[in-house]
Image: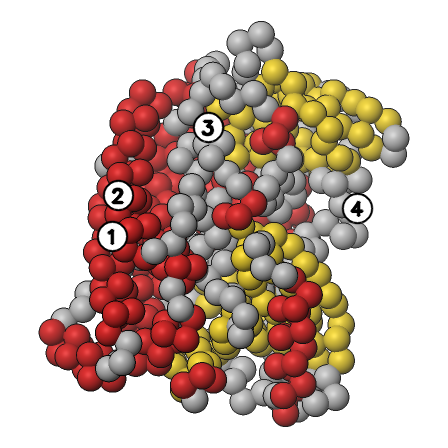
């Protein structure tokens, strides 16, 4: 069916589709837009109402705003960019009475996440995707060969089955769809546990006077765990404030840390809270494989989030694009096997998956280390080196830099040694991901070598195994 003949974002009674996408988030919208632009019939099932779709808990900071895939034109989402003057991070370390100014590569924007969500849904609908709201998926359908062939869902108490050549899982962190699928016949990554995820809580706060740091993303470590507080300025007077923390931590105590910090900051005196939301996000390496016959996971559902910063919008957009393009290629061949969908995994790993896996090594270090020692080291680190580590997964450390850090961190040399050793381990992981296999047949051997490298990570950091 041609694009001009398809309904645009209109609900329909039909039950057979080329693709069913579960979740109208970033990854789901970019996947559905890619498929619809190629002329395929796509249904997006969203559990929220039409008014609430796109309204999620998010820090609202968008890194790489200038490099988004163009299947959804950037001009179409720019109205959601509320602050494009941010050019650095501001890392506050109260234990050391220090503030680090950290340059952030690429274009940064702080966005109105609800407006952004509405705009990408509108763009995917314009491309020809059909959206159905208030719909909860209750099961995934598989044939006798375990290929996924559709989903079962309930809307307004009515149950329906939606047949599809491919189901795209964009249902977010700890996706329930993956509990419904029998993955025993594929290499789809099932080594996923709640402890690999973090919780996030955020408020949108209005202040009377412009903040002095409206050109920065402000980050501050929490007092109780390896978590952090954030203050991201949507505008000079509208601030997204929140915190992220491991799911193993007590949430209410940490939320109280945020509220106490807000009370202690004079710029928030008399502030009004406009919106409160919470969510889970993956702080883990990407799924080793996110494909199964007739099934592809994208975005948060596949661990496509920077595990050190929690940033996942750009990764989700590219995951949606790569998944959509590979599904198009598979549908054109009439083959939606694991092998036919595998190239999607390769593109993710080549673009950012290996980098995220290397960054996860530093995340493991924070879990296994003394927080005060680590923050003391951070206070001695030049901002450009921190920026390299946070966004590239590695950083070069010259001898002048090394001597300078040694002088500034005397008394914490054991921890410094662990950090240097961790850097070596992260470099090894990054190099290993460059050899990600070109077919499912090579995954087991590749995983075995990666897991041996991870044993060295745990030995270096002293952390308990994460996977």
Give percent across and percent down for residue 87: 42, 75
Residue labelled with disc 2: 453
How many discs appear? Answer: 4
Q: In the image, is 181 to the left or to the right of 467?
A: right
Numbered badge on residue 425: 1
Q: Residues within 10 Å of mark 1 (few under 14, many from 20)?
A: many
Seen at 54% across and 16% down, the residue is 147
- Along the viewing direction, whichever of 177 and 466 lies nearer the viewer: 466
Closest to the camera, between mark 1 and mark 4, is 1
Q: Residues within 10 Å of mark 4 (few under 14, many from 20)?
A: few
Numbered badge on residue 188: 3
Instruction: Give the CA distance from mark 4 to mark 3.
Output: 31 Å
Instruction: Give the CA distance from mark 3 to mark 1.
Output: 25 Å
Q: Residue furthest left?
A: 399
Q: Earlier in the sequence, mark 4 or mark 2?
A: 4
Seen at 46% across and 32% down, the residue is 189
Looking at the image, residue 290 lies above or below residue 185: below
Query: Are circles 2 and 1 on residues that touch, CB within 8 Å?
Result: yes
Q: In the image, is 237 to the left or to the right of 449?
A: right
Q: In the image, is 36 to the left or to the right of 393?
A: right
Q: Earlier in the sequence, mark 2 or mark 1?
A: 1
Q: Quadrant of the C terminus?
A: top left
Seen at 55% across and 61% down, the residue is 245
Circle 2 sits in a helix, a strand or a loop, which is it? helix
Seen at 75% across and 35% down, the residue is 136
Numbered badge on residue 49: 4
């Amino acid at each position: 069916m041609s694009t001009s003949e398809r309904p645009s974002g209109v609900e329909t009674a039909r039950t057979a589709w080329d693709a069913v996408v579960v979740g109208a988030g970033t990854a789901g919208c970019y996947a559905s837009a890619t498929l619809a632009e190629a002329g395929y019939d796509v249904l997006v099932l969203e559990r929220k109402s039409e008014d609430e779709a796109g309204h999620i808990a998010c820090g609202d900071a968008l890194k790489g705003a200038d490099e988004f895939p163009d299947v959804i034109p950037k001009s179409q989402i720019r109205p959601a960019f509320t602050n494009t003057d941010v050019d650095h991070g501001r890392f506050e370390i109260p234990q050391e009475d220090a503030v680090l100014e950290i340059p952030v590569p690429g274009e940064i924007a702080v966005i109105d996440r609800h407006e952004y969500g509405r705009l990408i849904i509108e763009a995917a609908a314009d491309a020809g995707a059909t959206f159905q709201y208030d719909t909860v998926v209750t099961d995934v359908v598989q044939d006798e060969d375990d290929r996924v062939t559709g989903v079962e869902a309930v809307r307004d108490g009515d149950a329906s089955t939606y047949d599809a050549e491919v189901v795209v899982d964009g249902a977010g962190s700890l996706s329930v769809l993956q509990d419904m699928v029998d993955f025993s016949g594929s290499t789809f990554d099932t080594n996923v546990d709640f402890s690999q995820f973090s919780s996030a809580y955020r408020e949108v706060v209005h202040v009377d006077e412009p903040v002095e740091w409206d050109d920065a993303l402000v980050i501050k470590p929490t007092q109780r765990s390896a978590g952090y507080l954030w203050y991201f300025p949507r505008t000079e007077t509208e601030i997204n404030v929140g915190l992220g923390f491991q799911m193993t931590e007590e949430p209410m105590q940490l939320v109280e840390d945020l509220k106490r910090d807000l009370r202690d900051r004079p710029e928030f005196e008399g502030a009004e809270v406009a919106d409160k939301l919470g969510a889970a996000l993956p702080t883990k390496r990407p799924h080793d494989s996110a494909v199964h016959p007739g099934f592809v996971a994208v975005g948060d559902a596949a661990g496509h989030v920077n595990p050190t910063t929690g940033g996942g919008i750009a990764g989700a957009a590219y995951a949606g694009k790569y998944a959509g393009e590979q599904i198009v290629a598979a549908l054109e061949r009439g083959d939606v096997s694991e092998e036919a969908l595998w190239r999607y995994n390769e593109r993710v790993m080549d673009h950012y998956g290996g980098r995220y896996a290397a960054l996860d090594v530093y995340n493991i270090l924070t879990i296994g280390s003394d927080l005060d020692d680590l923050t003391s080291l951070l206070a001695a680190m030049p901002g450009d080196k921190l920026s390299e580590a946070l966004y590239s997964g590695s950083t070069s450390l010259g001898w002048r830099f090394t001597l300078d850090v040694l002088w500034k961190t005397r008394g914490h040399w054991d921890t410094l040694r662990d950090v240097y050793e961790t850097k070596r381990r992260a470099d090894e992981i990054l190099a290993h991901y460059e050899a990600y296999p070109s077919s499912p047949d090579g995954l087991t051997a590749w995983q075995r070598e990666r897991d041996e490298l991870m044993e060295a990570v745990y030995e270096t950091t002293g952390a308990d195994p994460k996977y």
